Amino acid sequence: MSSNERTFTLTDNQSGSSWDLPVMHGSLGPDVIDVRKLYAETGCFTYDPGFTSTGSCESKITYIDGDEGVLLYRGYPIEQLAEHSDFMEVCYLLLYGNLPSGEQKVKFEHDITYHTMIHEQMQTFLRGFRRDAHPMAVMCGMVGALSAFYHDSQDISDPKHRMIASYRMIAKMPTIAALAFKYNLGQPYVYPKNKLRYAENFLHMMFSNPCEEYEMDPVLARAMDVILILHADHEQNASTSTVRLAGSSGANPFACISAGIASLWGPAHGGANEAVLKMLEEIGDKSNVDKFVAKAKDKNDPFRLMGFGHRVYKNFDPRSRVMRTQCHKVLDALGVHNEPLLEIALELEKIALEDDYFIEKKLYPNVDFYSGIIFKAMGIPTTMFTALFAVARTVGWIAQWNEMIEDPSQKIGRPRQLFTGAEQRDYVAVDKR
């Protein structure tokens, strides 16, 4: 971040007073007007619902250019990382700022692997949930409860404590997600295996059982690894901002990540791929696709196609191209093209890539569209979709939380408001109202 002589002049058209606001420059992206002293100098706040035009922090982790369809992790294009890297290497990159050496990567993977088990008493805690509890409800509770089981890594002023807590959450999140999945099914909990890599271990805990050895499909393992990479971080989105806001109060890291999970659970955020499957079920049959596409084009019809376009990416979602390749590899490996919902999805994809309406409005299939299809093909229920998202996003939350803790300019979050309620009034006794 840098600042030069450029300023932004704000003028009050009633009093004629003017104020020069400093303009700050990042390494990429638009310039930022520094309004930190605005209230002290002008007596006014800014008004920005959703903070869509407000920079809440300085960050070196993830950069997005929505107009050009660019997503960079620490400067590396997401397409390159998805093609050449693996999730553990990306975790190291997000946490430490650079790709690891061979020796660093081996040690990092070892350290994460040997933190994957959870305290046995957490299974007792789990049994307090109903069997049909939503996995995200279970994860919110279980992750928040980690602070009750791991007291030795909650001093956020200690870099070693932060590192241990970070490793624990990255390692234990797939274990907790798989535990919630098994509990919902009524199946026994499957322990992690240290010989397996991160994505492989996750699939093993999800789909194996004590009766027989789980046969790992390398195509599915690689697809899961790529899915984790693509969802690892996404700049200052709702859940990441929630983690930072919770962390700004000095809350322990487990509580902060639990808050992020709660935010991710919202259908406007992490539930988008689940909404895709619900849409496919509503369409019902491939023969109905044209009718529903027409409904989507009708401005007076409330029906909307889910999984097309993106709030941030105005051109195309760079993750969707990578996900599309993985999607078709998974479908080929599993041989499930004749599954009705997947047939509908593939027909929608074909129309969206060829129809002028979709092309002109840049309504391309996004990452949620393809991830929903992959999860469906792999036999993962829709209730688990957002839980898998949380597994991937944990490293991004942790990296952002660490960056916030180490930022000397960071303060406790305290947004302002435009108050439009009643002015001061006097209390009236109940018998006189």
Image (cartoon, grey):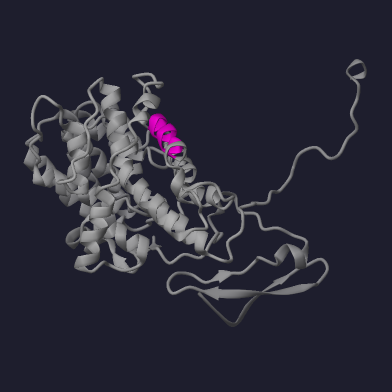
* Residue furthest out toward the top: 431
- Residues 260 and 355: in front is 260
Of residue 350 and residue 279, the one placed in the foreground of this image is: 279
- Residue 378: image x %, image y %? 17, 35
Quarter placement of the C terminus: top right
Quadrant position of residue 84: bottom left
Question: Magenta residues: mostly which secondary structure?
Answer: helix
Q: Residue at x 26, y 31 (%)?
A: 280
Q: Residue at x 23, y 55 (%)?
A: 109
Nearest the eye: 413 or 342: 413
Residue 21 in magenta stretch: no
Q: Quadrant of residue 70?
A: bottom left
Residue range of the region highlighted in magenta in the rendering: 136-146
Residue 254 in the image: x percent, y percent? 45, 43
Q: Which residue appears at 28% of the width and 61% of the height?
A: 78
Indicate the position of residue 65 as horizontal and vertical percent values: 39, 64
384 with respect to 51 (left or right): left
